[in-house]
Image (cartoon, rainbow, N blue to C red):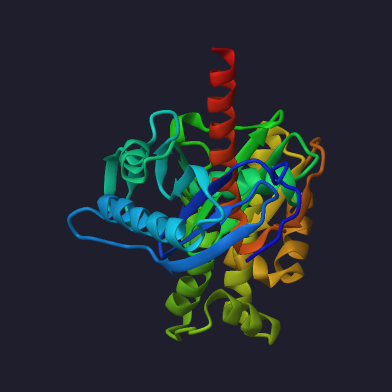
Amino acid sequence: MNDDGGRFGAETRPAVLAFDVGGTDMKAGIVLPSGRIIGLQRLPTPKHPEGTGGAVIQKIAELAADFRERYANFPFSAAGLIVPGLVDEVTGTGILSANLGWKDFPFAARAQAALGLPVAFGHDVGAAGEAEFRFGAARGTADAVVLVIGTGIAGAVFSDGRRLTGGGYAGELGHAPVPDPDRPGSTTILEAVGSAGAVAARYTAATGRSVAGGAQQVLALASAGDPDAGRVWNEAIDALAFSIVHCVSILGSQTIVIGGGLSQAGEALLGPLRTRVEELLTIHRRPLIVPATLGQNAGLIGSALKARELLDTIESDIEAL
């Protein structure tokens, strides 16, 4: 049970059900208007060779039934569902998830039918970014990028106080071109150099030595003077800075929030990243580069926010009749 006091409004308003589906695991819970999470569950994301989208719907229906039975004192009136990959939030469709194997899957419609509730649907990193933008590290700024760096990289982009969706394609910073350190004069994608997964993989490719501790182990080796680890780590920082500078140049981003597994490196990442961004910028205003503050539940909070906004819209429409 988590208390995030006062985030959503008066405790007398209805609760919402929130689901955050990730590539590896998923989270679920009842979220009260205060932001308090009841019955938080973490479990592996269900996968099925013939339809992972359907398996996800089946699992959230099971979880909802369990929540209704075990937490009868906390009835919920809407649900939020967020998933990875390319999504169309307007139509409620999972456009594509290469890792989880769905294409053009009607998540919102299927979830609403399975749960018997209004369902707000969205992108996992977009929703986590919305939570950081409204209540976390980017609170109070109008222009921000929330960059989640883990096995892969994804982002949520905010301009003039609102999140850009681009029909589901905005924020795919992991696929932005960056200089390829292995092929001078060529480009690769940011995810292939700057992600936690890439740091570990590139070190192993360079040395033939596996790193069970992943990017954190590479950082430790770099700090101990390993030249290959130092090179791989610095190249990751260069690639991240390259993409951040483009965001600042094009969008005028004031705040860059760094989340995900790689952010656990703290100032060992953020300090050199700030320095490199400063070196690359010219006339632009200098952004704040800060760690995310909401932790692992940011996506679940964002999912609940979407459900709350849907509920508010429904209530407003009823009042207007």
Quadrant of the drawing holding the C terminus: top right
- Between 12 and 208, the one lying in front of the other is 12
Q: Quadrant of residue 142?
A: top right
Give the image location of residue 275, x and y in percent: 78, 58
- Between 291 and 267, the one lying in front of the other is 291
- Between 281 and 96, the one lying in front of the other is 96
Give the image location of residue 34, x and y in percent: 70, 49
Relative to 128, say whether 317 is above or below.
above
Task: Look at 79% across and 50% down and name the residue there.
Answer: 278
Relative to 243, say whether 319 is above or below.
above
Relative to 200, say whether 46 is above or below.
above
Res. 22 visible in picture:
no
Horizontally, residue 234 falls left or right of residue 102, namely right
Res. 170 visible in picture:
yes
Give the image location of residue 32, x and y in percent: 63, 50
Residue extending furthest front?
Answer: 73
Residue extending furthest left?
Answer: 50
Task: Look at 29% across and 50% down and name the residue there.
Answer: 53
Task: Look at 54% across and 67% down and name the residue there.
Answer: 196
Q: Quadrant of residue 297?
A: bottom right
Task: Look at 77% across and 44% down and name the residue there.
Answer: 139
Q: Quadrant of residue 223?
A: bottom right
Quadrant of the drawing holding the N terminus: bottom right
Give the image location of residue 146, x and y in percent: 64, 48
